[in-house]
């Protein structure tokens, strides 16, 4: 079985979905990924690359094509993205998220923040927090209504605060096996 490449990004959020995923047992999170034929190529907390190593790593992965791109946390669009700057490229992080999504076979919003903007988008939302394909209950978000990965599948939303590790692992396993179709998703993805 050819392994599928997983890139996991974190933006405006608490990291709780990663912490929840790490609570998976029988098997644990990393073993479950490997058992599904998924290679974790990048995660800001779980892989070794950091600092100036990240930009060339992500550029290389994007050039080769990313099988599964996960985002945890909301996308910060306010003040032209100045609320979240990429540490390696010194650019608004939303630009990097959008560029990688454009090169991904599947795009997954992990958690309510990545799906809909979550708690970060509450109140006056001065940070311009949004989800990947939704702004609260309205279609749109960073990638816009109608976005689809190169597979043709829209953003797959795994809502929850935090998400249950089983939901994440089952969804990723289905994607790795190319066994999830648009007809399997509800109107919210």
Image: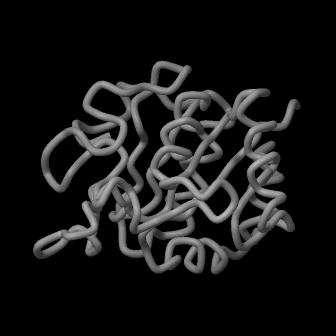
> Looking at the image, is 28 positioned above or below residue 92?
below
The residue lying at 46 percent from left, 80 percent from top is: 14
* Percent x, y of residue 82: 40, 63
Total number of numbered discs in the rendering: 0
The C terminus is located in which quarter?
top left
* Percent x, y of residue 160: 36, 67
* Percent x, y of residue 40: 78, 53
Instruction: Name the foreground residue: 76 vs 42.
Output: 76
* Percent x, y of residue 91: 54, 53
| Quadrant in the rendering for residue 142 | top left
Instruction: Name the foreground residue: 177 vs 151.
Output: 151
The residue lying at 47 percent from left, 19 percent from top is: 152
| Quadrant in the rendering for residue 162 | bottom left
> Looking at the image, is 139 positioned above or below residue 169?
above
The residue lying at 80 percent from left, 51 percent from top is: 41
Q: Is residue 116 left or right of residue 64?
A: left
Q: In this view, does 175 lie to the left or right of 35?
A: left
> Looking at the image, is 20 positioned above or below residue 102?
below
The N terminus is located in which quarter?
top right
Colour scheme in use: one colour
The residue lying at 48 percent from left, 70 percent from top is: 164
Instruction: Name the foreground residue: 124 vs 20.
Output: 124
């Amino acid at each position: 079985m050819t392994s599928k490449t997983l890139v996991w990004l974190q933006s405006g959020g608490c990291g709780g979905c990663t912490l929840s995923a790490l609570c998976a047992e029988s098997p644990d999170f990393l073993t479950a990924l490997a058992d599904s034929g998924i290679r974790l190529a990048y995660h800001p907390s779980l892989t070794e690359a950091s600092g100036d190593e990240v930009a060339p790593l992500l550029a290389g992965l994007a050039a080769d094509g990313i099988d599964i791109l996960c985002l945890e946390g909301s996308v910060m669009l306010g003040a032209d993205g100045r609320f979240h700057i990429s540490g390696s490229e010194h650019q608004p992080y939303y630009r990097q998220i959008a560029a990688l999504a454009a090169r991904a076979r599947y795009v997954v919003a992990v958690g309510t923040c990545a799906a809909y903007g979550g708690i970060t988008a509450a109140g006056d939302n001065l940070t311009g927090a949004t989800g990947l394909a939704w702004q609260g209950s309205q279609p749109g978000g960073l990638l816009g209504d109608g976005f689809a990965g190169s597979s043709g599948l829209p953003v797959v939303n795994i809502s929850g605060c935090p998400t249950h590790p089983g939901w994440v692992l089952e969804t990723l396993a289905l994607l790795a096996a190319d066994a999830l179709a648009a007809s399997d998703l509800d109107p919210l993805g």
